Image (tube, rainbow, N blue to C red):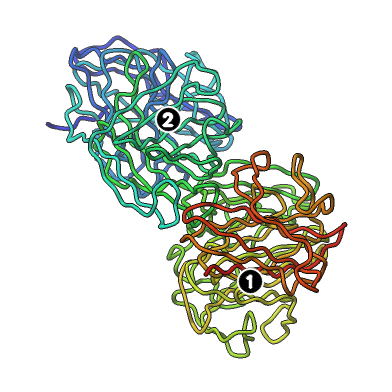
Amino acid sequence: MKISALAIPLYLSIATSLSAGTLGVDALTGSAGLGGGVTEGYEFAVTNADGIVVDGLGFWDDQSDGFILGQTFSVGLWDANTGTLLRSSVITSSSALTPSAHPGGDWRINAVPPIFLPPGLYRMGGLLPDVGANAVIFIDATLQLASGINLIRYLRHIDGTTLIMPDIPPPYPEATYVSTTFTFTPGPLVTNASNIFTFSSSPSAWIGGGNTLTFTNVSASRTFNLGAYTDSVHLSSSGYELIIVGPNLTLARVGYYPGATRWPFMGAGAGLDFTAPGRGDNTLTGWFNVLQADYQTNGQVASFAVDFVQYDEGNLTWWNRGSIRYNSSVPVPGSPPPMDFRRLVRTNSLVQLMLAGPAGAQCVIQTSSNLVTWGPLMTNTFSPIGLLAIDDSNAVGQVRRFYRAVSASGGTTNNSNDLFANRFQIPSAGGTVTGSNVTATKEAGEPNHGNATGGKSVWWTWTAPSSGLVSISLDGSSFDTTLGVYQGTSVASLVSVAQDDEGGAASASRVIFPATAGVTYQIAVDGYFGASGTINLTVKRGLLNDAFADRLQLIGSFDYVVGSNVGATWEAGEPFHWQTTGEQSVWWKWQAPASGLVTISTAGSSFDTILAAYTGSSVASLSLVANNDDYGSSVTSQVSFFATAGTVYQIAVDGYGLESGSILLLLQQQ
């Protein structure tokens, strides 16, 4: 079927009547654009009884050699009656060039997931940034109309930052340049639409259980006004189900939803819940990327495409990754989501930004005062849930300061932070970053990190915003790590602050140290005797596992970890772990790999400890298994009990009275 193009490059004037598929428009000249920008567009009617299928969106490219005034443009397609955004795309100079019958330029068009438009009213619009005062555009133009598609009226919406369905009709005080287009095929949607529900999971994932499964019998439904369950989309197959909802209980539309938490307890954020037969999470984190979301006239799901990642109980090593297609021809997996600024806040001289982007991807944050000359602010990696927080303390005294994010060449395995001089910056608020040391090297004069032989080190840098205890963990990394924290501005001047080899879960490293406000700390991650893999690095002010909900993982039949309860707190409803003393507890959890006697000890800790083991999934539901204050002649503690394979045990370490200090925790199962 031949692809046609509906294309409108023109200055607005009062439209003349339609004739033979061509609309004559008077050419005008004048100032284009408004201060802060404007969404310009038009309303059109599909009158063809069979409807049309839209498969591309585009924008006019003046002279076919670059965009008007060097800009890029967001383009959208809406249902005129409901205001629903049906499709959108960002047109750039790399978008496909499509010839036009109009003189002076051609079209730049991006393919979009095909969507069927039945007879009815629709609107097309493009966001024009502020192009400056007295920018004169003068192009003679005619409107190309296809059979069964009629122009109704020209429209605009004044908004400088957001692509919004145009809704204000003419007359306008100045000439306007409207240049959005779409490609279509006549007739109903005919595709190789399919149903597929596929996912993979890590061996420790509670939901996926290490399985990789694919099903083709997919069902889809939508709730309506049901309180906390309002407008959630349910996709299921063979007992597995994915439930998603947008922020503030909004219906999921095409777009990227990072930082999702468990539905229906997600508050004002995006909600996500991937479940298996008889299995669900208490808490979770993750993201989902909706690539197609079409709904029937009764509101139920017509076609849907979504990719997702879920971390069971918020543990990055318990991952489930999947793709679901319902009556959709979108490939599996779909394209990664774009980078997008979600928030920018200025408090005094500090600017804080939040970006969304592909989880694990590296990006360079750049700044400019004039939108011409750009310089790097930092290079960093999107967190596993697709978010990246950035602090910019250099904005003080700046009249204008612009920000942009660009992809770092090579993705997450290019080791651009291999050298100390190229270390990546971690936001002062802390957080989790990911990376790799697969192709990393060791520099001349570089120390052994974690007091162990390495050879594949990569570097980060972090500045403490306030004084206090700081925890740095490599839990969730895929290899035997070593970790070093230093002060100093070069490899030759490094002064050790904290070192560790295997103080975290399994063979991961972990340190806790007192940080000083304003001091910059250099963080090196290496592999034990050259081990390498993916890195999961968490920097957190305070303790990692003060709260029961943040308990750390012990792994396997033998594990030895370090920790601290200095500054730890007491939770509402938390039991005394030995008689009536304590109140400075920290938490771990352990799932028994087999049935048998297990011994847990705090021997070597620096203070008078209390140790307790429980079953139960919340503080309120804890059931004591074993506890101890002083074991033998020591003031440290030890418990032994028979563990049942598959059972999860919660482990609390506290101080007798109000004692606190460093913790050494050993678990060994016979």
Q: Camera-side residue: 216 or 299? A: 216
Q: Which residue is mark 1?
A: 503
In the image, taking residue 227 as reference, residue 82 lies left or right, namely left
* Amino acid type of the residue that numbered disc 1 sits on in the rendered structure: Gly
Q: Camera-side residue: 464 or 665? A: 665
Quadrant assignment, res 158: top right
Question: Of marks 2 and 1, which one's residue comes earlier in the chain?
Answer: 2
Residue at 46 percent across and 37 percent down: it is: 273
**Is any atom of residue 311 visible in this view?**
yes
Quadrant assignment, res 562: bottom right
In the image, taking residue 179 as reference, residue 444 lies left or right, namely right
Total residue callouts: 2
In the orientation shown, which residue stands out farthest toward the bottom?
Answer: 445
Q: Camera-side residue: 144 or 347? A: 347
Picture disc at residue 253: 2
Judge depth for marks 2 and 1 and give the one in front: 1
